[in-house]
Amino acid sequence: MTGPVDYRASAEGYAGAHGDMTPLSIDAVVALCAEDVVFHDPFNDTVGRAELRQVFTDMFQSARDPRTEVLTLYGGGLDWIIKWRFTAGLPVIGDIDVLGLTELTLNEAGLVVSHLDYWDSGPAIYGRLPVVGGIVRWVRGRLSARSRR
């Protein structure tokens, strides 16, 4: 007979494993997730461990030295928020340094069923692309409160 699940330990374990992830530890991170885990970020919407593994594999293949630093973990029970900083070198764009949040949901067994990333890809990615970046910066400037004073 097993005791109650320590959801804080599950959330901390996932956050730590995600923050320490390398190409060799992707499977260990994915093993902390339910078979039908949902993952969402500004570029991906996936369901399932195989698809999540592919997202993480692609990150290490397409980015130079990607690192996620876990800054804070908030929450309780099945619902958690991870505040993080992501740095990497990206083709065409160069080095990025992004702050973001992950909304993490666990199931009753303490496995991750939902990993939803929230971060502003506009200035970090689109605003730094040739041609498109100029358009994004112009639109942001036109929509900012300062431009309407």
Image: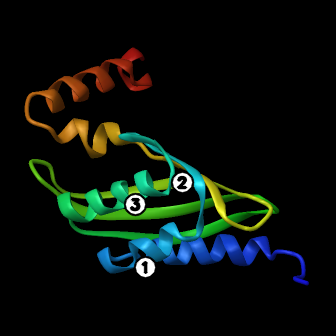
Q: How crowded is mark 3: few (under 14 residues within 10 Å), some or many (20 or more)?
A: some
Q: How crowded is mark 1: few (under 14 residues within 10 Å), some or many (20 or more)?
A: some
Q: At 60% across and 69% down in the image, what residue appears?
A: 72
The residue labelled by disc 3 is 53
Report which quarter residue 68 is drawn in.
Answer: bottom left
Q: Position of residue 61 (x, y in %)?
A: 20, 62
Q: Is residue 41 above or below residue 58?
A: above
- Residue situated in front as seen by the camera: 40 or 74: 40
Q: How far apart are the two marked residues, 1 and 3, measured between alpha carbons?
A: 15 Å
Q: Are marks 3 and 2 in contact (CB under 8 Å)?
A: no
Which numbered disc, 2 or 1, marks the residue closer to the eye?
A: 1
The residue labelled by disc 2 is 101
N-term-proximal mark, 1 vs 3: 1
The residue labelled by disc 1 is 20
Which numbered disc, 1 or 3, marks the residue closer to the eye?
A: 3
Residue 81 placement, left or right of 45: right
Q: At 42% across and 17% down in the image, what residue appears?
A: 149
Q: Position of residue 85 (x, y in %)?
A: 42, 64
Residue type at mark 1: give it. Asp
Give the secondary structure at mark 2.
strand
Q: Position of residue 88 (x, y in %)?
A: 25, 63
